[in-house]
Image (cartoon, helix red, strand yellow):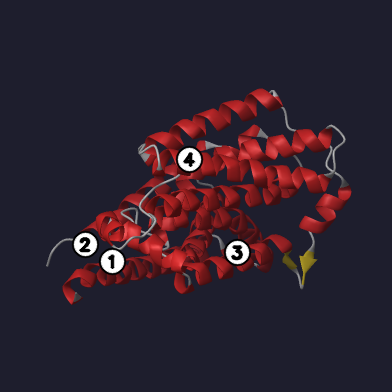
Amino acid sequence: MLQATRPVWSAQYLRTGALVLVAALIGLYLYTYAPSFFKLNNAVNILVQASILGVLAIGMTYVLVSGGIDLSLPANMALASVLGGLYVQGGGSIVVGCFIMVAAATALGTMNGIAVAYLRMIPFVVTLATMTLASGAAVWLSESVSITGFPESFFDVLLARVGGVPLSVYVLGALTLISSLIFSSTIFGRWLYAIGINTRAAQVARVPIGLVTWLSYAVAGLMAGITAILLTARLGSASANMGSDSVVLDIVSACVVGGVSIYGGVGRPLGAVLGAIFITALSNSLNLLGVSFYFSLIVKGCVIIGFISLDNLARQPR
């Protein structure tokens, strides 16, 4: 038993050590060439941006830990925002509009879960197809135009600051706490790990694999719906462009850097959130240094490859 768990612990130590080293080197470089990075206003800005990515990363954690993946989260978020925005623009209540965002995103996540759990479809293929479907629907419904007309009360509430900290950061904190408790203290959390570690053994142990799998995708969809509300408030409008392809890269980067294994069975929501903060800070620092957006994608891609390599290396038999 000790032998089986050793590679996982090694992977965690390797990730942590690599993350601390990279953060220290970046911090030293920024202190020399971009000292504005360490200003309070910039730190708050990083937290606000990370709160959006963090909620999506929490949703992805549910799916990754269970052994799957959901590439459709950003597109799901964009479609949900557009649907809710169109309802509000047509004179509907903002409360109902927010409910539509959450319900639509959760429904799309549930659809992914049913396809993977009960129709035995490959997660990568299913969610890639859903991503295409949702992106196309969002562009078609919005006609590639930003949807405005949200009431001021919507922005007053969601952009409010409590103790100088934006509400979205508190939302991220609450979701992190709730999800951490689910993973560590509930039977559902134990089932997620069991399925991710060994599906066959989980089946023998009578774990309801189908139910747990589709629920993990439904929760991921729920997180996409919550993010749709937060991001719509921050941008001031709903748009199909909210779910750009680069967001998927950021979500996966956040999870991998935060210790969530793409092989399943390993990871915690708090780690994914810390990874989201790291990735957001990395993007922010590259921007301050004048690095182009496209080169920043290369950097993030290298980060993913590096941390996956560490994970894979640590899992090799010793």
Residue sitting nearer the eye, 97 or 58: 97
Q: Amino acid at mark 1?
A: Ala
Q: Quadrant of the N terminus?
A: bottom left
In screen coordinates, is 313 left or right of 34? left
In screen coordinates, is 231 left or right of 260? right
**Classed neighbour count for the residue bearing mark 4: other residues with Cα under 10 Å, few (<14), some (14–19), many (≥20):** many
Instruction: Identify which residue is drawn at 26% across, 59% down.
Output: 204
Q: Amino acid at mark 3?
A: Leu
Whole-number angstrom distance, CA of label 2 to CA of label 3: 30 Å
Q: Marks 2 and 1: in contact by CB < 8 Å?
A: yes
Q: Nearer the viewer, mark 4 or mark 2?
A: 4
Task: In the rendered structure, find residue 175 and report the number of the disc placed on it.
Answer: 3
Task: In the rendered structure, find residue 290 and report the number of the disc placed on it.
Answer: none
Circle 4 residue = 112
Question: x%, y% of residue 62?
Answer: 46, 56
Whole-number angstrom distance, CA of label 3 to CA of label 1: 26 Å
Task: In the rendered structure, find residue 11 and report the number of the disc placed on it.
Answer: 1
Whole-number angstrom distance, CA of label 1 to CA of label 2: 7 Å
Circle 2 residue = 315
| Residue 301 seen in this snapshot | yes
Question: x%, y% of residue 142?
Answer: 70, 27
Please tell me whether mark 3 sits on a helix, a strand or a loop.
helix
Q: Is residue 288 above or below residue 3?
A: above
Please tell me whether mark 4 sits on a helix, a strand or a loop.
helix
N-terminal of the pair, mark 1 or mark 4, is 1
N-terminal of the pair, mark 2 or mark 3, is 3
Q: Amino acid at mark 4?
A: Asn
Whole-number angstrom distance, CA of label 4 to CA of label 2: 29 Å
Q: Nearer the viewer, mark 3 or mark 4?
A: 4
In screen coordinates, is 105 left or right of 237? left
Residue sitting nearer the eye, 297 or 255: 255
